Structure formats: C-alpha cells, structure tokens
Amino acid sequence: MKFTDPAYGQFEISEPVLLEVIMASPVQRLKGLNQYGSWQFILPKLKTTRFEHSLGVCFLLKSLDASLEEQMAGLIHDISHTAFTHVVDYLYRQEDRQEHHESLFQQVFMSSQIPKIAQTNGIKPEIFLEKENFSLLEKPIPDLCADRVDYFFRDSVLLGVCKRDDIKLFMDHLVVREGEILVDNTAIAKNIALGFMECSKKLWASPTQAASFQILADAMKSGLESGIINEKDFLLTDQQLYSKLKSSRNLEVTSKLDILNPDFFAMNNPKDFDFFVKTKARYIDPKIIQGETVKRLSELDKDYKNLMLDFIQKVSGGYYVKVFPRLKVLGSFPKTRINDKQFK
C-alpha cells in the first residue's frame, strides 16, 4: 500500500502482516475518528484521522529500525480511542491525564481479528497488551516516542509551525540508543521542542481546545442521562455518535452542539468566566546525545527550561474560560469544578 502523507511525503507499507492489520475492522474504524475531537467543528481544515496518524507512527517506527512487532503495535495503538478521541476524558474527569482509551485497549484488541492475524504470522498476541514492550512507540512525557513525534510532525505542518523540509531535517537527527529516541544535535532538539510547544499552545492545550472538549463532553453527558446514547456508543465513529446526539432534538444536547462552530473561541479570564476546565500539559524535553553523554535539553539550555516550566505551570493550573460567541445556554454550566486552581 502506498500513502501520501503531509509530513513524510510518499511512503509504502508492504509487509504482509501489517497489510492484514491495516484491513482489520478496528484499524479501519480509525478512518472515522478525527484526530482533534471537537476541533473539527471549529477549524474544519483539521481533517487528520487517527488512521492517518497510526500509519505515520508505523512508518516512523520503520524509519527508526523498530521491529516488525513494534511497527504492528504502532498501527493498533489507537484502536481503543473513543469517538471524538479525548473528549471522553472530560466526561470522566480525566482531562489532565487523557488516558481513558488505554483502559479499553485489551477489550477492543482481544475481541477483534488482530490476535488471530498475529498468531498466524508467528507473533504472540499478548505482547501487545503491555505497552512497556514497545519503548520506541510509547514513553511518558517529556520523552520522545513515535506516537508523540508523529502527531507533532503532522500537526506542525498543518498549523504552519513547520514545513516538510523541517520534518526531514528533524528525522535525520533522530537516533535510537537502548530503546530510546534521542536527538544528536542541541540546536535541532531545541527547534523540535519549541515547535512542539507552539503546537501545544495553539492546539493541544489551548483554552479553546479545553473549553470545546468540555462542552462536547457535557453534551455527551446529557445524552447519556437522557438515554439518547450509551457508553457502548463511544466505540462508534465520530459521525455515528454525533448523528445520534444531533437527531435527538434534545435541547440540553443540541444547544451545546450548536455552540461548536467556526465562530467559537475561548479565552482564559479568571475575572469573568463561564466555567473552569483543566487540560493536559503536552510538552517535550528531548534527550540529546553528545558522544557518550546523554542530557536533556533543559539541562543544556536554561532559556528553554524556563519556557518549559512556565508553560507547565500555566496549563496545569487550568483555565477559567470565557466562551465566544455569547450564548444563553452557557448559563447551564457550573461556574467552578472540582479542584479549581487559580491560573497564574
């Protein structure tokens, strides 16, 4: 299979087991999951799907000489994401961790045809149930990993933060040592880290992102409470779940959905706000290899360390969001939420 990708250009996947996995229904479902949750209603140009992201992760892992098993893990790592991706984390009050999909992985994986595909190709299915088996694919923040690097690459191009030539340069300076992705040049590492932070400010951890995710989560909550949807529906596609909510004509649901349109934005305003919401602080502090020495960027660059710490403090404190355009339905949202903390 040949693919044209905004970050990597053209690439192909030819290994038979990977082609089988791509065609498996849980992976195909990812075509119906927008990478950006509620952003798709606010900024329609954000069309990337979790299917495209998963292909990119697989390609990136191959580029880093990862094993065939780890490339396969890259293809399936998102199969348990719910409709509208991390919006469900706001429903379950996990917005600062955003890990609910991980609790569903075993169920989705084991009930699919993927374990049989693995066995037929001489791969033990159980290895995919422990993410620690794939250190290039997943690492905790602030380390680099294929998942984190891929969504940065594609989103930075989409947002105009980086160009494809920048991505090629970044990839040329990624190296693997003892199961970790490192950078072999300090200046390149800083450019990657600053670009990542810019994407986080604009998209992944902005007040608009947090507010829109919370509003859509509240619409889903109203849908659950009124019996319009149930938790099993979270494993539908975005459009399937949205259609159920929208067609209900339940004002508590549809009025919230209607807020999410291209005119929507939110700002942090502790003195005049509609509601408080937290989100996940996404940032990186790449490890840099210099000869035999490995140090984090923050150890080598005090300016970046200060920027990173300031960013973490601001995002982790949460947002007192004021939403625009002003709509009466916002009066139904509580002014404060659990563990409110003043934004500084």
Image (tube, rainbow, N blue to C red):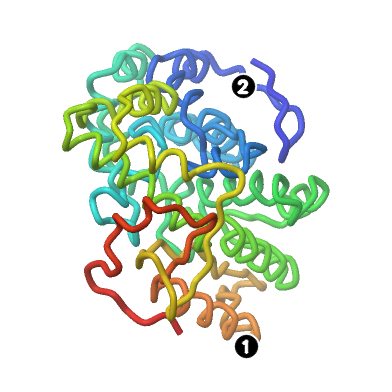
Is residue 84 at least partly visible in the picture?
Answer: yes
Whether pointer 1 and pointer 2 mark residues with C-beta atoms closer than 8 Å, the reply is no
The residue lying at 48 percent from left, 42 percent from top is: 38
Q: What residue occupies the far front of the structure in this picture? A: 328
Q: Which mark is residue 139?
A: none
| Sequence-first tag of 1 and 2 | 2
Q: Which residue position is annotated with label 1?
A: 302
* Placement of 268 over or under 157, stated as above or below: below
Which dot, 1 or 2, sits closer to the camera? 1
Judging depth in this view, the residue of 109 and 35 nearest the camera is: 35
Q: Which quadrant of the figure has residue 280?
A: bottom left
Residue drawn 27% across the image and 36% down it: 129
Q: Position of residue 228 (x, y in %)?
A: 23, 27
- Residue 281: horizontal and vertical position, in percent? 45, 66
Q: Which residue is mark 2?
A: 13
Q: CA distance from mark 1 to mark 2?
A: 41 Å
